Amino acid sequence: MTLPENLERVLPGIGCDLFDVLVIRTDFSDDEAWEAVVEEVHRPWGPGGEFAAAVQLVDAPAWSGATADEVLAALVDEDLVVVFVADRGTMKSSARALLALSTVWEGVSGLDPVYYQELIESPEPREFRTTPAAVHGVQADLALGNVDFAEYAGAAAAEPDQVLRPI
């Protein structure tokens, strides 16, 4: 379903616990690929797998085809620092690489992310790809402020396929 150009999609607002991984499915072309993502994000994580996976999945057709900007606009939780999107790239990738989107723009709240990126000289990266196995570490590090989004984006960009994997 595509919307006429003059209509905007209205998506339900989403919030999430600070340490929960939020994964939003926007591509519904491959249920088998989606199930592989779901299975992987629910696995225990950390050295030796000692941490239980805390995940909130959004798997609703209303999100079909949603763009990164639409996903970010629908987020209502001001403490959320990253959201992971299972988009067309995820479903086509052998690594099932999710799109990680930064929800933080230099601590400036209330600004449109696209407009904010236009205001600053060298914009911070807004996205990178990561395997489902790496999302919990990314979420925890970003929530705690141990690593910033740009560092993760740089690490992903340095990989041959530009996908971040668990260390």
Image (cartoon, rainbow, N blue to C red):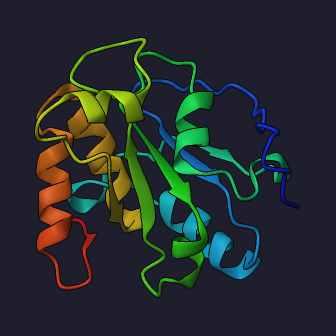
Q: Residue furthest front?
A: 6
| Residue 10 sits above or below residue 47 on the image | above
**Residue 20 pos. (x, y %):** 46, 35
Residue drawn at x 11%, y 41% as measured from the top left = 122
Q: Looking at the picture, does residue 87 appear above or below residue 159?
A: above
Q: Quadrant of residue 73?
A: top right
Judge whether 38 appears above or below 116 on screen: below
- The residue positioned 69% from the left and 66% from the top of the image is 27
Q: Position of residue 105 (x, y in %)?
A: 28, 27
- Report how many numbered discs are placed on residues in the image: 0
Tell me, yes or no, if residue 136 can be seen here: yes
Q: Position of residue 117 (x, y in %)?
A: 28, 35
Q: Is residue 125 left or right of residue 148?
A: right
Name the one closer to the observer, 52 or 9. 9
Q: Quadrant of the C terminus?
A: bottom left
Residue toward you, 43 or 141: 141
Q: Quadrant of the N terminus?
A: bottom right
User: Is residue 167 among what the camera can see?
Assistant: no
Residue plotted at (67% across, 71% down) = 35
52 left or right of 55 in image: left
Location of residue 24 in the rendering, given as x and y in whole percent from the top left corner: 61, 49
Q: Quadrant of residue 161?
A: bottom left
Q: Residue at horizontal 35%, vertical 46%?
A: 51
Whether residue 97 sits left or right of residue 85 in the image: it is left
Q: Is residue 159 shown above or below 110?
A: below
**Front-most of residues 3 and 151:** 3
